[in-house]
Amino acid sequence: MNILFVFYVPSGGVETLNRQRGRALKKYNINSHFLYYEKRRQLMNDHNAPTFITNNDTEIKKILQTGNYGAVVVVSDFQALPRFRKLGYKGKMIIEIQGYGPKETARDALTNAKPLVLSHANGFLNPKTPHITQLLDEIYPSFPKFSFNNCFDTTEFSYRSLPLNTTPMVAWIGRIEDNKNWREFLHIGNRLVKNFNSNLQLHMFEDPTISSPMERKEFENLIQQLNLKRNLTIHSNVPNSKMADYFSMIGDSGGFLCSTSKVEGAPLSLLEAMSCKCPVLTTDSDGVRSSIVPNQTGKYYTLGNIEEAVIQAKELMTNKTLREQIRSHAQEYVKKHFNPDQYSINFINMLKALGIKV
């Protein structure tokens, strides 16, 4: 059978998830097709499956007519529900929530979308994000809801042994926007450079096509203000296939991935790091709880508490025993809890529960 996954742009965690689950479901004779409304950058990772880029009603109507889709999974875009119905799609539609920023933003979005969801959708899917699960139970008490971990293929994306970087590397991944909290990372990095290791290398991985000019200006100003240019490297649109190299090098260098987000759904970048034995220091941004167990698979610090972040970062870089335990436990945790076969079984059970023949 065919499934169509729909999202705004082929970028970030959703794009990574789409490619991963496309491979996972293929083993179970489910063919994934992908529709993105627009492509804001040249680079596009190969999905190894039919991938459409269009926001044109006529073209989308043709995709829906010819795709013979058993179900359509729409990520976050509630307006697609009445739109696709109007374009003639009569099959099951699942709305997937992979993150909505702050909890109140999610509450507003889910509340406002209620008439559209109840009229046109058949179920909700979310990757065990605690605050989303809670909101769905509250706002949609009797509506079909499904919650299971995203998948991650550790055979495809995992640790690689590369030449050792003798200076610790500290990484951050995200968009230059408020919820990803880039300011906090720069302040943490600044404290570590000034008080721990003046040669520390800070690496920020981002997609410049998804940030506002005002935020970009503030970002550049803070880098200058903190005098971090010598220690900071900004990477734009690195192909996903190369990120395993970076994570492996960061882990081996004695550094870590620092996630400063205010609220997250189920960040795949953390799973990528963990699979490559790159330790993670993160805020408790809610969705990370499915992957980070304190001092076992990673470390937490309190959002906004830079002093605490620096203390935890130093321990992660200097306590070799704890560090190695976290690296090995984290890698095993991803293999066990984000297994692609388990994801496929959960996905198929969801389809069956909605009355879709698989």
Image (tube, grey):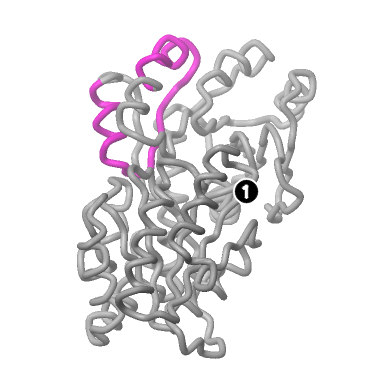
Task: Please report the residue visible at 44 percent of the width from the left and 39 percent of the height from the top.
Answer: 98
Closer to us: 314 or 298? 314
On whether residue 119 falls in the magenta region, the answer is yes
Give the crowd class for mark 1: few <14, some 14-19, many >=20 residues within 10 Å.
some
Q: Which residue is mark 1?
A: 208
Closer to us: 179 or 339? 179
Q: Answer yes or no: is residue 171 visible.
A: yes
Is the stretch drawn in magenta largely helix, strand or loop?
Answer: helix
Q: Position of residue 114 (x, y in %)?
A: 39, 14
6 left or right, relative to 316: right
Q: Position of residue 290 (x, y in %)?
A: 30, 53
Closer to us: 61 or 238? 238
Task: Please report the residue visible at 44 percent of the width from the left and 16 percent of the height from the top.
Answer: 117
User: Amino acid under label 1?
Assistant: Pro
Of helix, strand and loop, which one carries label 1?
helix
104 left or right, relative to 60: left
Label tally = 1
Task: Please report the residue visible at 63 percent of the width from the left and 39 percent of the height from the top.
Answer: 9
On whether residue 279 falls in the magenta region, the answer is no
11 left or right, relative to 232: right
Per the rendered image, the range of residues in magenta is 110-138
Q: Quadrant of the N terminus?
A: top right
Q: Answer yes or no: is residue 340 visible.
A: no
